[in-house]
Amino acid sequence: MSEPLRIALIGAGIMGRQHCQHLEGLAEARLCAVADPGPQAAAFAVECGMPYFADHRRMLAEARPQAAIVANPNNLHVSAALDCIAAGVPVLLEKPVGVHLDEVRELVAASAHAGVPVLVGHHRRHNPLIARARELVRSGSLGRLTTVTALWQLQKPDSYFDIPWRREPGAGMLLTNLIHDLDLLRHLCGEVSEVQAVTSNGVRGFANEDSAAVLLRFANGALGTLTGSDAVAAPWSWELDSGENPVYPRQADQPCYLLAGTRGALSIPQLRRWHYAEPGAGWHQPLLQSLESFQPGEALRLQLQHFVKVARGEVAPLVDAVDAGNTLALIEAIREAAETGRACSPHVISAP
Ligand SMILES: NC(=O)c1ccc[n+]([C@@H]2O[C@H](COP(=O)([O-])OP(=O)(O)OC[C@H]3O[C@@H](n4cnc5c(N)ncnc54)[C@H](O)[C@@H]3O)[C@@H](O)[C@H]2O)c1
């Protein structure tokens, strides 16, 4: 068995600390340094018994990690990841991969040129529940996928927005939250070719949106809707429904995604499947239900285990910067659609 991979943390806020908790339980990797200029970061590094650096560039030069987790504010993702790549250090980069596509193109080029991999933290794809749902859709058990209904409706406490970057452009519900749902919709249902959208900041009044309604046209012909708000006392979201993260009290009976096809339908996260005994029997016949099974697993832990293999060059990233860039392209298309009132297509990016 090889030595545990030495992983540094850049950005020791809420998400960075969650990664550290999962790292503690892994035999194949260990934390080796913390870099974060924030007021609480030095104390956190002491708590973990780790060398502390205010500046991640100094950390890269002095601690010489074998890999790094970047969990700083969204608009610093690409610059920190570029510094890691320049130091030859593979990166687990939190989502969103960046805040605009031009910088992501730069990241994609740098990663390819240096041969240093970037895994983007769309961790929900690592959830075995999602893997099973994808298998069901891909196997054709729903027939031709026709309609997709996605919900992300919950209430963040007002105190969440005490941290200034969360109220500013570069954060916001689209980039911070719906990006997860859009990533999963791409993963489960295929690429989106066109969107229409309306957004609002009417409840919170910040510089970024608190609510959005999006129409989606998938390249395979399916049509979808995604409605989101971080300001509603409602139970429909991956966070509340999936039980993936115990900090959110669970609403286990509520779905957040409903996929319907010509031969069947699926609710997620329940993995409840509907179909007729005779395909095409129609509404006078009983619609049969079954619960699909899967082996549960912790997505963040599975993502870290995958990252160790990526950093060691054993596997390609499940979500690389190109892939995550194409989810960001959807966010940009949604913004453009909301601003212009027109249907917009994402400006997809590809590997160099
Ligand atoms: N995958 C998920 O489900 C998930 C969940 C929450 C947040 N996130 C992502 O994680 C990132 C962090 O979010 P958060 O909620 O933990 O935010 P946070 O504000 O709690 O933490 C951000 C940390 O970055 C630090 N920081 C600021 N400038 C820095 C710099 N130049 N170098 C290093 N560190 C710096 C801050 O001091 C702070 O400690 C965001 O990109 C967010 O989108 C992902």
Image (tube, grey):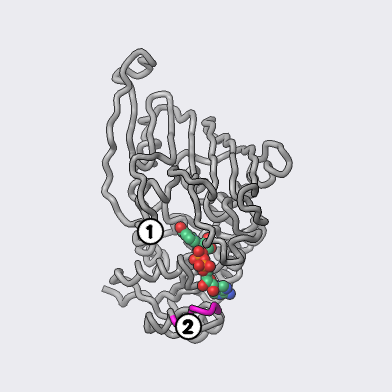
Residue 246 in the image: above or below residue 162: above
Residue 119 image position (x, y, % from top left): 47, 61
Which numbered disc, 1 or 2, marks the residue closer to the eye?
A: 1
Please tell me which residue is depicted at 34% across the width and 46% down the height of the picture.
Answer: 129
Residue 103: % across, % down: 64, 62
Residue at the spot x=42%, y=52% of the render?
A: 124
In the rendered image, residue 40 lying in the magenta stretch gets the answer: yes
Say which mark, if any, is on residue 42: 2
Please tell me which residue lies in front, 205 or 238: 205
**Of pointers 1 and 2, the one earlier in the residue sequence:** 2
Determine whether label 1 and label 2 are within 8 Å by CB: no
Coordinates of residue 311 in the picture (x, y in percent): 42, 68
Q: Residue at x 28, y 35 (%)?
A: 291
The verdict on residue 307 being magenta is no
Residue 177 point in image, percent of width and height: 52, 52
User: Does residue 162 appear to the left or right of 286 in the view shown?
Assistant: right
Q: Amino acid at mark 1?
A: Val
Quadrant of image for the N terminus: bottom left
Q: Is residue 131 visible?
A: no
309, above or below 190, in the image: below
Q: Residue at x 35, y 63 (%)?
A: 305
**Magenta segment:** 37-43
Q: Is residue 149 visible?
A: yes
**Quadrant of the image occupied by residue 37:** bottom right
Q: Tell whether 34 sits left or right of 3.
A: right
Disc 1 Cβ-to-ligand 1 distance below 8 Å:
no
| Viewer-proximal residue among 21 and 202 | 202
- Residue 247: numbered disc: 1
* Callout 1: SS: loop
Up/down of 61 relative to 227, above or below: below
Q: Quadrant of the C terminus?
A: bottom right
